[in-house]
Amino acid sequence: MNETSELQLETKNLNVCYHNHCILKDINIQIPRKQLIAIIGPSGCGKTTLLKSFNRLLEIRDEVRISGSILVDGINIYNSGLNIPDIRKKMGLLSQKPYPLPMSIYDNVAYGLRIHNRSSSEKIKKIVKHCLTEAGLWNEVKDRLHDPASRLSVGQQQRLCLARAIAVEPEVLLCDEPTSALDPLAAQQIEKLLLKLKKEFTVVLVTHTLRQAKRLADYVIFLYFGKVIEQGPAHKFFSNPQHPETQAYISGDIS
Amino acid sequence: MISSLCVVIGSLVIIIFLVVYNGLPTLSIEMFTQTSTGGYYLGRGGGILNAILGSLLLAIPATIFAYILGLGIALYLQREFSHPGFASLIRLILDILWGIPSIVYGIFCLMIMIIVGIGASLLAGILALTLLELPIITRYMDESIKMVHPELKEGSYSLGSTKIETAFKVVRKQAFPGILAGMLLGLGRGIGDAASILFTAGFSDNIPGSIFDSTAALPTMIFHLFSSPIPVVRQKAYAAAFILFIIVLFISILSRLFSKRYMKYVIK
C-alpha cells in the first residue's frame, strides 16, 4: 500500500482568517484512514473551525479567508470547479447539540437518500432500517418511525443524526464534541458507536475532555492558539509528549 | 400602563359589542344565500352572497400569490444567497411598502389596468391585494427564517444537499409557524381592506363568472351599505361586518387546527 491510500485527509499550510484575525495558522496535519482521530485543545483554540473547514461549511456563514489546501483522497477540496455538495456528502457531521431535520424520524434518515436520487422506496426503507440499527436506535423507534424527530430525547436525537449521516455513505465522520450536550449514559452510547464505526469510517472527533480522547483515540492532534503543537499516535502522544505545551496540557497545567 | 391596557381592551369589547348588537338581529339565512338585487339597497329582500364569495375569491388567491412570491424573497435574503447589506436594503424597502396606504396600491393598480387595458375585475383586485399583502407576508417569513438555527442548516448541508434543497425542504419547514402567522396576518389585512379594491375590483350585484368580471367584496359592501340614508340598510352594514368578522375568525381557527399537524415537526 502506498502512502496516499493510507491517508484520508491532509492539510497543507492551512490558514483561516476572519477579517484580520487568524483562527488557524499554518496547519499541517495528516489524518490516517479508518481510525479515530481526536483533535484536542483548550476552548477557543480553533478546533471547530478546523473541523468545519474539512467540509467547506465555514464559507456559508461569514466572510472568511482560507488559504492553503485540504486534500481529501489526494484532491484539494478548495479547488475551484468542484461541486461543494459532493464534497460535503463525503463528510458526515455530528454537531455539539443534535439538530435533527424538522421532519419525521424516518424522513430524517431518508432525506439524504432522496436528495441523491437513491431510487426505489423499498431500497430506501432497507437503508433506513440498516442505518438506524447501526446507530443503535432501531429498537427504540421501530414502532414510531413517523413520529416527529423533535419528540426524541437529546441522546436519541444525536444517534438519529449519526444514522442520517451514515445513510449517505460518507468516508469521514466529523464529530464536534458530540457528547457535550448529553447525559453520561447517552454519551457512553455515542462513544461506543464511534468505536464501532471507525472500522468503516474515518472518525474525526473534536473534544475538550482529555479523558475522552484517551479512551477513544488512535491518533491525536493537539491544537493550541490556532497552531498544531503536536500530533501522533495516541499511545505515543499520551505516554511520551514531546513539547512542553503538550506536557502541560496533559498534566492539566493549562486548560 | 393599566389605563392604556383598558383603552385597548375597552375598544375591542366595544367594537365587538357594536357589531354583534347591531348586526345579529339583521342577520338572516337570506344574507348568505342570495345576491343583492337592486332593491336590497333600499331595504328590501336579498343578501350579500356576492360580497361574501367576492371577498374569498379576492383574498384567498391574493394570499397564495403573496406567499409564493414572498417565500422566494424571504429565502433569498438568507446569508447563503445574498450579501447582508443587500438583504437589509430589501428589508428596508419591504418595510416602506408595508407602510404605504392601501388606497395608493389601488391607484397604482388602476394605472396599470389602464395601460394594459382591463377594466375593474376580479383579476385586478387580486393583483392589488397581492401587492398589499406581499410586504407583510414576506417580512414575517423573513423574520422567522432568520431565527432558524445555523446548525440545523449545516446538518442539511453536510448531507450533501444544495442551498436550494436546504432552503425549500428544511428551512421552510422549520420556519413554518412564522410563515403561517404571516399568511394569516396578510389574509386578515387583505380580506378587510376596502381602499385597494374600490377601483380595482369594482362592484357588482352578481357573483363573478370569470376573472374579468367586476365583483363586490365585504368591505366595499359595508362601505356602500353604510353610505345609505335608510336606517334599515345601515343595519345591514353591521350584519356584513359581523359576517366578515366570523370569516376571519373561522379561517384563523381552521389554520390553527391545520397547523398542529406541521408544528410538531419544528425542532426547538
Image: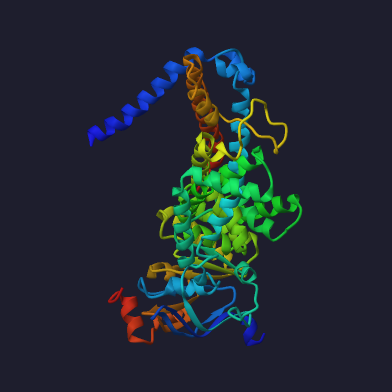
Q: Give the residue displayed 50% in from the left and 34% down from the top.
A: B192
Q: Give the residue displayed 49% in from the left and 56% down from the top.
A: A189
Res B61 quadrant in image: top right
* Res A136 seen here: no
* Res A173 seen here: yes
Which one is in front, B186 or A213? B186
Res A34 quadrant in image: bottom right
Residue B222 lies, in percent from the top left, at 51, 26
Residue A94 lies, in percent from the top left, at 51, 62
Number of numbered discs present? Answer: 0
Which one is in front, B165 or B238? B238
Q: Give the residue displayed 61% in from the left and 71% down from the top.
A: A84
Which one is in front, B2 or B126? B126
Residue B44 lies, in percent from the top left, at 58, 12
| The N terminus of chain B, quarter of image | top left
Vertical relation: A38 (above or below) B248: below
Residue A9 lies, in percent from the top left, at 57, 79
Vertical relation: A215 (above or below) B254: below
Q: Is residue A174 left or right of residue A40?
A: right
Res B163 quadrant in image: bottom right
Q: Give the residue displayed 74% in from the left and 50% down from the top.
A: A121
Vertical relation: A29 (above or below) A211: below
